[in-house]
Image (spheres, grey):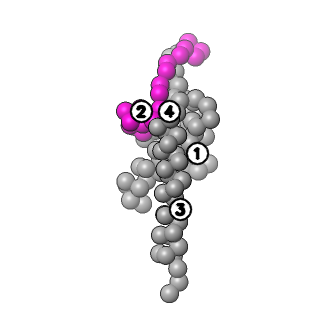
Amino acid sequence: MDIQLKRGLLDVCVLAAIKNEESYGYKIIKDVKPYVELSESTLYTILKRLETAEMLTVRSAEHEGRLRKYYSITDAGLGRIDEFKEDWKEIESIYQFVAREC
């Protein structure tokens, strides 16, 4: 799969995982696992990129004696999910064209 396309898909998957409630790294990986394989190193790269793009916010809180980062989606992140849904219609159309039998 094209690396840029995959990167965009993974970004949206991570945003979707925190769409309804804040979450943390391990839980995000667990939530997306039925749909896509995501390593910790890849996840934290994505989270940093999304934070820089202001699509999510981060807060730290103590959990069982350790500091844990919690991620929440922003309006920009919700907007990116909406954009993806619109883009997906075009991707489906392209797929139908490519997959058609001649």
Between 68 and 95, the residue placed more toward the observer is 95
Query: Of the residues shown, which amino acid type is indicated by label 1?
Result: Lys
User: Label 4 crowding class (10 Å Cα cut-off): few <14, some 14-19, many 20+?
Assistant: some
Quadrant position of residue 48: top left
Q: Nearer the viewer, mark 2 or mark 1?
A: 2
Q: Residue at x 37, y 55 (%)?
A: 3
Q: Is residue 71 magenta?
A: no
* Mark pair 3, 2: CA separation: 25 Å
| Residue 22, position as x, y percentages in the image | 58, 29
Q: Is residue 28 above or below residue 63?
A: below
Mark 4–mark 2 CB contact (< 8 Å)? yes
Q: Earlier in the sequence, mark 1 or mark 3?
A: 1
Instruction: Name the residue carrying label 1.
Output: 33
Instruction: Name the residue carrying label 2.
Output: 54
Q: Nearer the viewer, mark 4 or mark 1?
A: 4
Between 55 and 18, the residue placed more toward the observer is 55
Instruction: Name the residue carrying label 3.
Output: 89
Which residues are drawn in magenta? 45-65
Query: Of the residues shown, which amino acid type is indicated by label 3?
Result: Lys
Q: Earlier in the sequence, mark 3 or mark 2?
A: 2
* Mark pair 1, 3: CA separation: 24 Å
Q: Secondary structure at mark 2?
A: loop
Instruction: Name the residue carrying label 4.
Output: 74
Between 53 and 101, the residue placed more toward the observer is 53
